[in-house]
Image (spheres, coloured by chain):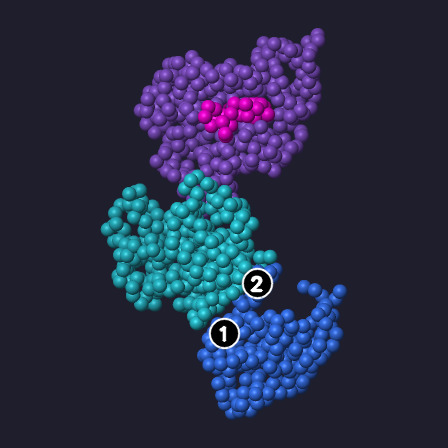
Amino acid sequence: MPELEFKARLLEPDDIRRAVSRIAHEIVERNKGAHDLAVVGVHTRGIPLADRIAARISELEGISVPSGKLDITLYRDDLSEVGLQPLVRRTEVPFDVASRRIVMVDDVFYTGRTARAGLDALIDLGRPANIQLAVLVDRGHRELPIRADYVGKNIPTSKSEVIKVKLLETDGEDAVELWEVRA
Amino acid sequence: MRIKIKNARVSPNSEARDVYVNNGLIEGFNLDGTFDLEIDASNFLLSPALIDPHAHLREPGQEVKEDLQSGLSAAVAGGFGTVVCMPNTKPVIDDPEILRSLIAKAEKLGLARLLPSAALTRGQEGKLLADAAALKAAGAVMLTDDGRTNEDAGVLRRGLEYAHALGLVVSVHAEDASLRGDGVMNEGEVSERLGLPGNPAAAEAARIARDLEICAVTGARLHIQHLSTARGLQLVRDAKTRGVNVTCEVGPHHLTLTDSKLETFDALYKVAPPLRLQSDCDALLAGLVDGTVDCIGTDHAPHTKAEKEQDLLEAPFGIANIELAFPLLYTHFVATGKLSLEKLLELMTTGGAKVLGIGEPKLEAGMPADLVLLDLNTKKIVDPASFKTKANFGSPWAGQELTGWAAKTIVRGQVVFDASSS
Amino acid sequence: MKHLLDFQDWDRTSLEGMLETTQIMAEVLDRPVKKVPALQGFTVCTAFFENSTRTRLSFELAARRMSADVLTFTASTSSTTKGESLKDTLETLEQMKIDLFVIRHSASGAAHLASRWTDARIINAGDGRRAHPTQALLDAYTLKQHFGKLEGLEIAIVGDVKHSRVARSNADLLVKLGAKVRLCGPATLLPKELEQPGVRVTTNLQEALEGANAVMALRLQLERMSTGYIPSLPEYQQTYQVNFKNLKHAAPDAIIMHPGPMNRDVELEGNLADSSRSVILKQVENGLPVRMAVLYHLLVGKK
């Protein structure tokens, strides 16, 4: 693993709370409510984000929005290349995706390859009415023609930089940090 | 050709003498006069050349595994001056013509002396006796169906009686075929864990017990080949105490390897009888020390690389070891103080000669000049690629550091192996 | 781990990880699209030198469910019958850029030898009497699925233990995962040397079944009569058949297993095999996700 150097703290807990809330509002607005809507988080940090967004939408709309967990490992396009074996985790989508509007949630939007894998994984679960993409941070550098529907914060980065998203549920605190790979 | 072997010692502490060799014989000691070749033996030990009563040289018919040229080259590289080859060839050596042609060919090669054994029964089929008198007249020194087992006790009995009248020893591969079954390794904890068909120690012991009874009743000379078990050895020990006319041999592999080697699934370790337990190795060593074991027989049994690179069910039995026999036993047992040098040399020279009933080699004037200079100091790593045998693709002992390598081997007064030039 | 030859070099953690991945693969197989692209770009060759269509098909379907390319080599349609050795065959096949060989062979140790002769990964799909690790894994998975855990379970394996790679692999694996194993069969077919911590060996069926949580009956090759291992079929059925009658000695909720193919009413009472106590069909079903998990674990991250 390359050594990382801390550069800056980009988002505080309140920033993250507001970003999640704004994404939830935008989802409701764009979908004209929360009917037939479901949220699916991509392992690992997409999951708590999806839960938070689902909870906020439920609050706003007064109806329960289901939330699922998606592991995209078996859909990665680099498994014949990787040197270290990624751990396969469970996909738990406790609702029928067919004909639903699905919001796929991830923490960082970068090359677009994870989102592509996520789309394939979701479609293999059934045939959703549509799939939308929500991300907490968009750091640019897309390698595939994919864009996000909801973005918490756009953060232009260089390729040598690393965005670390920390969430209470997985890391004990809410924060977004910028790190750089040491040359 | 007159050779002067300068500063020769017959044991590490004995007085150094100059040994003169002339016309194929030992001429005498500390003589004068000119010589054609002088060998400085200061760093070596002089011994009569080693005698192997049991080797498979594969000729005729299986020259792809070994032939007289390669097998006898390997023998002299191992310090052997005399080798008894086994008759389980293709065709079987049960015909005086084959014997005569083998002996003639070996004479021409001028390496180690070849003393062929011949089949006890026609085609080694264990049914009809081979023409033993004609075979003896053609040069056979031993009758054996080795490679096979003698399942018909009545045939063995008559073979022993017939051979005894001719003054020939009969040697047996003592394993009960029905107890051995399809066993490819020693039956025990390792074979059961590995799921490989086992060959129980009882297969050897039961057959030795039977053959000792037959030997006793006939009074004939029976030689038991390649003892591998403590129990088999004890049966021979008891029989000898009773005065039964039996001798036995042990091979280097049964003294230095155990069945745990089969955990590699490498067919290099597939041998008949199989590698046993450490307790068997220890018992066999005790048999060397106390004289129950008469001689070392290598059971040198080369096969091709392709044959040995098969799975353990398919691969043939046998280890190529004639070049390593003395260094192995010297390093494992003499250098560690478990066996005296004198005893090891006796087991590898006079021991075999007594079994065969041929003249015992002595370092005396007038005796054949079959000699070996053993280097007891230089350490060398076993490298199969340097073997003279055709089975030079691998060895159970590859990578081991051994001492006791033959420096020079002299047969019929000629230097037939010289480590410094080979 | 590079190869799955047996369980000797596998630790409990990685084996438990394998069972967890199996569960995920089983979930994949429950979806409308029962296939993932994970092993795209990998080539798997099933090289069967001993016939076993069921096992071979299970491996091939597992590889296809993972999107690997699959090559099939079976000895009956091949050059081994013309004298080509295992080594020659593997070396030839490897030229086709095989990433993983699934090998079935009648000789114990064949898979080990193969792992020395090629750079490809090796899965042992059964070598002689020695090991059949994916069968043991699917048995362990089936047990875990049923009981929720393996720790503390008592498993009786009954029949021709001597010639059984399934018995050996199960004893190795189940003990590693915290279960206890009793091996039972006629004395001629029960090597006492297999006794080790966690594994008890007994010729007494009632003793083997006493309180067992699961009973696995092993296939009895009918040739064992002609080779003199057992006197007769009726005598075997009388003493070692697993049936409703002797299952009373086992735990009240004990399940019945069989690695297949079964000699109905020989080693196992047919009605019992068909009953609700039996998880035999579950075992067959679980073969697929187990093999998918093993393929994932051996192939991904190999570069």
**Which residue is depicted at the point 72% across and 78% down?**
A9
Residue B342 in which image quadrant: top right
What mark, if any, has residue A123 been given in the picture?
1
| Quadrant in the picture for the N terminus of chain B | top right
Q: What x and y, as percent, mark residue B4?
A: 68, 14
Q: Are marks 1 and 2 on the same chain?
A: yes
The kind of secondary structure element at disc 1 is: helix
Q: Is residue B71 visible?
A: yes
Q: Nearer the viewer, residue C265 or A98?
A: A98
> Could you tell whether B311 is left or right of A30 in the image?
left
Residue at 52 percent of width and 61 percent of height: C39
Type of amino acid under label 2: Leu
| Helix, strand or loop status at disc 2 | loop
Of C41 and B329, the residue lying toward us: C41
**Percent x, y of residue B238:** 41, 28
Residue depth check, mark 1 versus mark 2: number of the one nearer the observer: 1
The chain drawn in purple is B
Part of the protein shown in magenta: B53-80
Colour for chain C in the figure = cyan
Q: Is residue B59 magenta?
A: yes
Check the residue under mark 2 and report the chain it is in: A
Residue B355, compared with residue A32, is above or below; it is above
Q: Amino acid at mark 1?
A: Ile
- First along the sequence among labels 1 and 2: 2
Residue under the image location 53 percent in, 61 percent down: C40
Chain identifier of the residue bearing label 1 in the image: A
Residue B412: in magenta span: no
Q: Colour of chain A?
A: blue
Q: Identify the residue under disc 2.
A: A79
